[in-house]
Amino acid sequence: MKRSTDRDNAYHPLVWLSKLLLLVSASALLSGCGLLFGSDAAEPTEIPVTVHTVPTFTPTPMRQEASTPTVAPTLAQTQTLVALSTDLSTTTVASAVLTPTVPVSQTTTSTPTAVTATGPLLTVNDEAVNIRSGPATSFALIGTASKDQTFQIVAKNPVGDWWQICCINEQQGWIFGALASVANADQVAVAADIPTAVQPTETPVTVATTEPIAAAPTPAAQPTNAPAPAEPGDSTAGIFNDDATYKIVHFHVLGLNENNGGIRDSRAQHLIFVTVVDANGNGIDGAVVKNLVGDHSEIVTGGKGPGKAEITMYYDPFKLTVASDSSGPTTSQVSNQMGLAFPHIPDIVGQLGGTDYEYAVCPTPEINCTLPIHAVHYSYEITFQKVK
């Protein structure tokens, strides 16, 4: 009966599981030694392991409806080093769990560092601004800048109306100061090396002359800034007949910085100030001043003061004459054509900026002086005097 019990115990599932765990642990220990000491180390001496059988009580066999599945050792069990005690060594190996090393991705995402610009800055105010190689319109154009673009200020010209900026097309350039706003520019120094402007060659202009006409005696003062003389075939020129009852005795173009005149500035004024006076210079109310072109409108003097009236100009041109007064229809000289888009060109030459101004209109008859004129506001003064 004793033999049968030992045989049953030897084949008991728990005994087989214990043997299996001991064999797996021994295998893990040996492979661990290989990991610790390298693959070139001498193979370890096989150590006999004595397995002691522990007597167990055999339970009364019970009817099983189904076979019990074999339990496989877990990963944690196979990775545990079991302390072994042998007759040949008293060394105790501490149990440890082998944790596999998982490579960690070390990809780094760079974040752009915001750079806050400090120091002198220039911001473009106009829709399109020329940038030149020097501080004058005679210098070569190296690029353009658009509204709200910002640049660092490098230097300025001695007058302080041009700024040297960085950079356009990978080079430093110059912007006219009136077309931009600046910040922190109090300490900007004058550029040490400013190129010399190339002066444009003046082209002689031939002016047609006519035989002088003797002026009729008149108590009125001589005209100041009189309209430019008519030129052959010029339809914008006026008619200055000497036998007219009313003559033009004062004519003046109010250009930049006069009557808030300006270029590319919607706030600038664009008016014609009309005055009609008698032989003694007193204002004549009720005189009818007629526009012979454009809208052919009429205005009556006296609404803006003695003998005065005002006309607001837009796109239509004006050629004015006194059509009548309190005595009835009258004769009058006719002014040169006035207007923003279609003026008589000789009247505005040099009145809307010189050659040193980036966006000047008609600084000379050859420069930016083609009809129609755009993006400029200015005004006129004209006085008619009754001389007969």
Image (cartoon, rainbow, N blue to C red):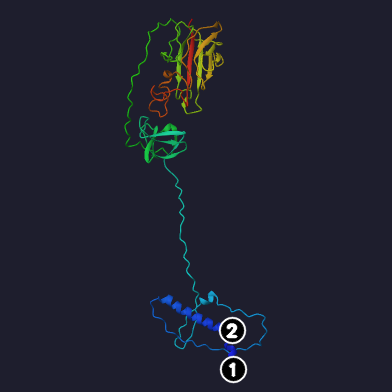
Residue at the image position 49 percent from the left and 73 percent from the top = 98
Q: Residue furthest bottom?
A: 1
Residue 331 appears at what percent x and percent y?
Answer: 50, 7
Q: Quadrant of residue 39?
A: bottom left
Residue underneath mark 1:
3
Disc 1 crowd rating (10 Å Cα; few below 14, some 14-19, many 20+) is few
What's under tag 1, amino acid-wise?
Arg
Q: Quadrant of residue 222?
A: top left
Residue 33 appears at what percent x and percent y?
Answer: 43, 78
Which type of secondary structure does the marked residue at label 1 adopt? helix
135 and 210: which is toward the camera = 210
What's under tag 2, amino acid-wise?
Pro
221 and 140: which is toward the camera = 140
Q: Residue furthest front?
A: 66
Residue underneath mark 2:
13
Question: Is 117 above or below relative to 105?
Answer: above
Residue 70 appears at what percent x and percent y?
Answer: 59, 79
